[in-house]
Amino acid sequence: MFIKQAFKSRHEWWRYAVGVVIIFIATQIGSIPFLGAATFKVIQQGGSFEDLADTTKLMTILDSNLTLFLMLLSFAVGLLALLLVYKFLHKQPLVEATPSRKRIDWGRFWFGFGLIAIFTIIVTGIDYYSNPQDYVVQFQVIPFLILAVIAIILIPLQTSMEEYLFRGYLMQGIGVLARNRWLPLILTSVTFGLLHIANPEVDKLGPMIMVYYIGTGFLLGIMTLMDEGLELALGFHAGNNLIAAMLVTADWTVFQTNSVLKDISEPSAGVDVLFPVLVIYPIFLFIMAKKYKWTNWGEKLFGKVEKPITVSKEIHENAIDKML
């Protein structure tokens, strides 16, 4: 039982409250280099400080590769803080925060990664050849290679930080406190989605895009609970963000990179938002369910979380002796 893993470590409510504060402060500290560099560039060019408050403009102040590096740096710092919180505040080994199995299953990670990566490449390729007027090929060897190094190293750290925080730390923490599975699934999924509300995609597409973000949170949460581990979600999230950053970008996305393609079409928040959540995501879950033989969906998604009763042999024998 994935959530029950937290019972093996120190799991008092105040530890999770303190842990969240520590992680939040760490990510803010990690964002200082990005904001500092952007502020310096604005001052140097005699620009307006209002640009720093506009997420869309903020993403274009610095070189795109430098922006990506500095932006992802805050997640790397946050991940380090999260690992330290696990180790020193909760005394919880990372393996207990990842699967309910004895060891991390990297096969599951790569399956999740490959599933979304192959899907994204195929769909983008079909759309490119069907609607070539919607794309510009902007591939440049040197900028792309720099992007590849940054993305391959830092994007998995970014997605791992988010997965360990939401589907790991908070899923287990809320689960052991609420003693059920449905509340942590809902809270972590909705919170995950709402944290994307400052993304430039929301300004461009409107609040409808939040259905996609929250739906993605539920997809990753269901993966975690049904598979009793984080590996599928870790791989899926990393594959999604990595391929997206390197394959195609647009002027209105949070990742504005030196990717192979640039989408110049006018986006709309309708079918493009609902179709993945209502059709594609269930197909992904079906594929995973068949491969890993998921059963007992109701219990795993909505069941109770009961604290294991652990009685040592010595205590048990002493109690019997006293009774005699």
Image (cartoon, rainbow, N blue to C red):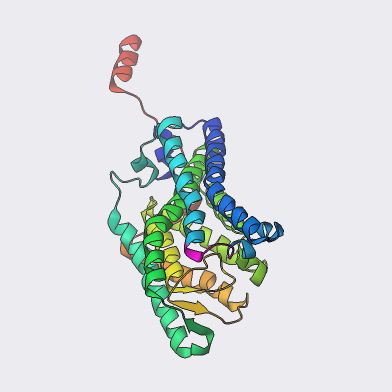
Q: Is residue 61 part of the magenta span, yes or no? A: yes
Depth order, front residue of 305/60: 60
Seen at 43% across and 71% down, the residue is 283
Q: Where on the picture, by quarter, is residue 48?
A: bottom right
Depth order, front residue of 174/208: 208
Q: Quadrant of the N terminus?
A: top left
Q: Is residue 168 shown left or right of residue 13?
A: left
Q: Where on the picture, by quarter, is residue 236?
A: bottom left
Q: Is residue 92 shown left or right of residue 74?
A: left
Q: Relative to 145, say whether 138 is above or below.
A: below
Q: Is residue 213 part of the magenta span, yes or no? A: no
Depth order, front residue of 7/165: 165
Point out residue 278 in the picture as x, y percentages from the top left corner: 53, 71
Depth order, front residue of 307/215: 215
> Is residue 285 visible to us here?
no
Point out residue 176 in the picture as x, y percentages from the top left corner: 49, 38
Classified by dominant secondary structure, the portion drawn in magenta counts as loop
Q: Is residue 57 shown left or right of residue 7?
A: right
Point out residue 313 in the picture as x, y percentages from the top left corner: 28, 22
Q: Where on the picture, by quarter, is residue 259?
A: bottom left
Q: Relative to 209, say whether 298 is above or below.
A: above
Point out residue 290 in the picture as x, y percentages from the top left corner: 34, 66
> Is residue 204 visible to us here?
yes
Q: Which residues are magenta?
A: 60-65
Q: Is residue 40 shown left or right of residue 261?
A: right
The tally of labels here is 0
Q: Quadrant of the C terminus?
A: top left
